[in-house]
Structures are given as C-alpha cells and as structure tokens.
Image: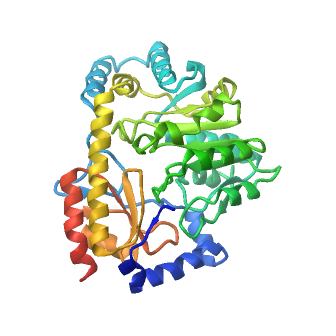
Amino acid sequence: MGYRLTRRGLLSAGSLTAATSLAACASGTTQAAALAEATGAFPPGAPDPLFGPAPGVALLSRNENPYGPSASALAKLREAAEQGAYYVNPEATYTLMKLIAGRHGVEPEQIVITTGSGEALSALALMYGPKGPIVAPRLFWDTTAIYASKLGLASITRVPLTEDMEVDYAGIEAAITPETGMVQLCNPNNPTGLTTPGHIIRPAVARMAEKTTVVVDEAYIELTDDEAGITCLPLLHEGKDVIITRTFSKIYGMAGIRVGYTISSAETAEKIRSTAMSWTPCTSIAAAIGCVDDEAFIAYSKAKITEGRQMVEATLDTLGLPYLKSQANFVYFQSGQPANDLQKAMAAEQISIRGQYMDYAPWSRVSMGKLEDVERFCRALPRLISA
C-alpha cells in the first residue's frame, strides 16, 4: 500500500481528526462534498508574479521543476525565437512527432502535439463529455474535466478513493455504464502522488477499454522507479481504446513553455488533432525538439527531484507525520493542522505550498522545488506545527 503512517502520527489528535474527515468525504453525500466536487481539486488561486516566483519566495505549490529548461531546450528555443515572425513550420511539428514516436515505439501519426497536456485533456473532455459522464477517481487532476463541465458539455462521476487513498479501479469499472463518455485516470495520481503498478492498472484499463474510451494521464511517469513497467503504452499495441497524455512540464522542466502530447491509435489521434484549440508555438516545438532525447538532463532532473522528496520524507518521518509514498515531484501529507492553516503559516515564512484540495482538509501538498527551498520547508515545518 502507498499509505505511510507512523505510530506517532497514528496516535496524534490530528491523525484521528483526519481519519474522521476522510471517512466523511469518501461518502460523497454531504453538501460540503457536493460543493467540493463542483469546485474540484484545483480551485483558482491568488494572482502570481509576472514570471516565476517572487524574490525570496520558496515556490513549492505548483509541481514545477525549477531545474529546467535544459541547455539543449534553451538553445533551440532561442533559435526559433529569432524566427518568431513566422507561423510554426509543419515540418518542425512532424519532426517532434517522429522523435516522440521513436521514444515510445509507435508511429508519428499516433502522436498529437498540444500546448501542454492540459490542452489535450481539455480537448478530450470536449470530445467525449457530451456522450456521457466522465468517470474518474474522486481526487485526480480534474481541471480539464471541470473545464468541459462549466461549458455544460460534460459531467463527472467521481468514485471514492480506497481507505489507503489509492484509486479504486474495481469501483471505477463498476461505475461504467453504456452512457459513460470516458474514463479518466492519472498515474501517478495528483495530488496523492501514489503510483499504481503495471500489473494492476493495465488489466483494469484493458477491461474498462472494452466498454468505453480510457484516458490515462501520465504527466509524472518519467519520475517513477519503473516507467516502462507502469505505463499503459503496451495496451495501445494491443489495439485497446486507450489514450495516453504526457507533458514536457515535469521531468523536462518546461511548465511555462507549454508542450504536451497524446499517444493513441492513428484514427483517434486525427480526431484529437481536429479538436485541439490552438497551435503550439514554434518556440515550444523547438525547445521540445532540443531536449526530448537529452538523457543526461533527464537523469539530472530526476535525481534532483528525488533528493528533494527524500528530504521531505525524512523530515516527516522524524516528526512522525503521516504521508503518502510518492513517486512524483510532490508529497501529500498530514501535519495535524488544517491544510489551509498550514499554507497560511508557511506563506508568512515566504514558503508557498498548496492548501486544501476539495474537502480533504487534513491533507497538505508540498512540491519539490530547488533543494535550498525544500530545505527551508523542512526547517520551518517542525516549528510551525508545534506553534
């Protein structure tokens, strides 16, 4: 199981409160739960500085990777910027499609390039949402599904997480009906950070795909211990009705440059391509071409993120605080305080972490930023939870 709970954390009053809150929210029957589902896991936040974090702020709230973009990405980006007067050359887009296809063992026609995986997921919600409800875990990266919902083009059927905060695949499969528009999953899941092994997720997705289209958001999968063993890519080779989304925002550190993509059958890819809402800029395409096969940077980036995550886990272990064992670039934990209270206390220290998601009030999320910023969080946490 992914739930890391120490004896001290179990006996704490905060943990007892958290257990009660979690049981209540899992039922999905209260008015507060209904409001939380309408708002989603990622409600709009306060305005951010023009670019990046404000001076002196440890930005650990948005799952960014500050160790990118790589030198290889920046070199190509500068080259393309000098030609920014011109629309992106279709050959440049196709070049990136070929490079991505080569990494994943598929054909270029199976790849659709989008402005971040967010655009891809939004397009999919618009494609499949009108057919029927989007079935998903109760807690997942739901912004794109809510985008279609706010337009009146989709609804979301949320399946409660298990007691261990894992995705309930059996429950999701049981929730599929002939009217279901699509299933949307996230592996590793956000904000929990938990990763479902391939021997569990692949058979489950294969069964679901016999009934409806299944979208698997793999934004963080390059950060896991076994990408090849976890990804649902093999299901595409078996002809399953599966769409995988990936991004350059995480391992490549290009969240602001905006490049994502889908992997699917060529037939489905053509439908997605006609639904995508914008043209990915030449600078974004160029940066992705520059770094897609930069194995040295990928290894460096993953090592930095893993080091930061280990620092946070060591701090939480020392404090006896419960947390979920993440393989992404963030950790979901309980401090014994409401998440919004801890967020405010950290903000007073110029440390930015995420507040409450939906009605999961006891749970906080901290992202892995620069190591010196992660260290600031680790030093502040003991003092703030004992204040």
Q: Residue at x 41, y 50 (%)?
A: 328
Of 116 and 305, which appears nearest the observer?
305
Residue 304 lies, with reference to residue 375, above or below; the image says: above
Residue ID at (53%, 42%): 230
Horizontal side of residue 256 vs 88, given as left or right: left
User: In the rendered image, which quarter is residue 239 located in?
Assistant: top right
When the figure is inspected, residue 89 is found, relative to residue 42, above or below; the finding is: above
Locate the C terminus and report the quarter of the image it occupies.
bottom left
x and y percentages locating residue 360 in the rendered image: 50, 71
Q: Residue at x 48, y 61 (%)?
A: 2
Residue 113 visible in the shown view = yes
Q: Is residue 113 left or right of residue 352?
A: right
The x, y position of residue 367, in whole percent, is: 34, 56
How many discs appear?
Answer: 0
Q: Nearer the viewer, residue 183 or 207?
A: 207
Instruction: Kindly indicate the quadrant of the structure image that contains residue 205.
Output: top right
Residue 125, horizontal then vertical, whole percent? 64, 45
Q: Judge whether 242 appears above or below 103 on screen.
A: below
Asked if one can make out residue 51 in the rendered structure from this viewpoint, the answer is no
- Residue sticking out furthest to the right: 178
Outermost residue, bottom side: 13
Quarter of the figure with residue 379: bottom left
- For image coordinates 83% across by 49% down, the residue present is 178
Percent coordinates x, y for residue 184 in the rendering: 62, 49
Side of 190 relative to 387 (left or right): right
Colour setting: rainbow
Out of 70 and 48, give the one closest to the viewer. Answer: 70
